[in-house]
Image (cartoon, rainbow, N blue to C red):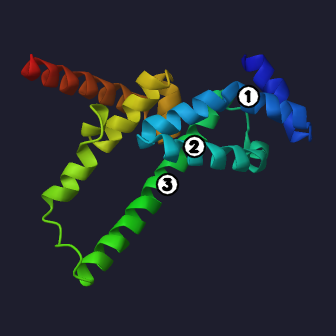
Amino acid sequence: MADDDQADVRAAIAGDRGAFERLLRRHYDRIHGLAWQMTGSRTDADDIAQDVCCVLAEKLADFRGDAKFSTWLCSIVFNACRASRRRRRTFSAFTDRLAVMAGLMRSPDGRDLYDEVWIRSAISRLKPDLRDTAILVADQQLTHAEAAEILGIAEATVSWRMHEVRRLLGARTETTD
């Protein structure tokens, strides 16, 4: 598949719409799946996948071939999810402040914010750096080196984070048994 990606990337950059379509068809499930895993919401994943597909045409010329196309694409999706989270947090904080000012809700006590962040799924209970690493390595089946490149950290840090994920999830299952 990597050879097909390389040929299709070159052709798509040169303006071959069929090659671009083949890339999207080949990788759409990964784009959407990673977005869904990162956001926990099918609706958000749909939106992010659509956005990624739209900007991919522009960003394709930036692909240098230093990594596999699929790894590079995962980094675009990952960054789109991060941007979406930032926008959502900013908007949510704004609407919460507005509601408090308007007297429609009481001010959060701190625990509410903590609960909102950590209660989405078993993996989302992990710290964000561990969760993001686990999603890339375990769900997207990227190598530690590929995940390190996307996260902008050392490969050894990815290995340590995955060790922590296994330790924390193992401790959690022991306490529930």
The residue positioned 51% from the left and 34% from the top of the image is 34
Which structural element holds mark 1?
helix
Q: Which is more toward the observer, 173 or 105? A: 105
Please indicate, yes or no, whether residue 6 appears anywhere in the rendered image. yes
84 lies left or right of 59:
left
- Residue 84: assigned label: 3
In whole angstroms, how far apart are the C-alphas of marks 1 and 3?
23 Å
The residue positioned 32% from the left and 36% from the top of the image is 130
Place residue 12 in its image quadrant. top right
The residue positioned 86% from the left and 31% from the top of the image is 19
Q: Which residue is mark 1?
A: 25
Q: Which residue is mark 2?
A: 46
Q: Nearer the viewer, mark 2 or mark 1?
A: 2
Place residue 6 in its image quadrant. top right
In whole angstroms, how far apart are the C-alphas of marks 2 and 1?
15 Å
At label 2, the amino acid type is Asp
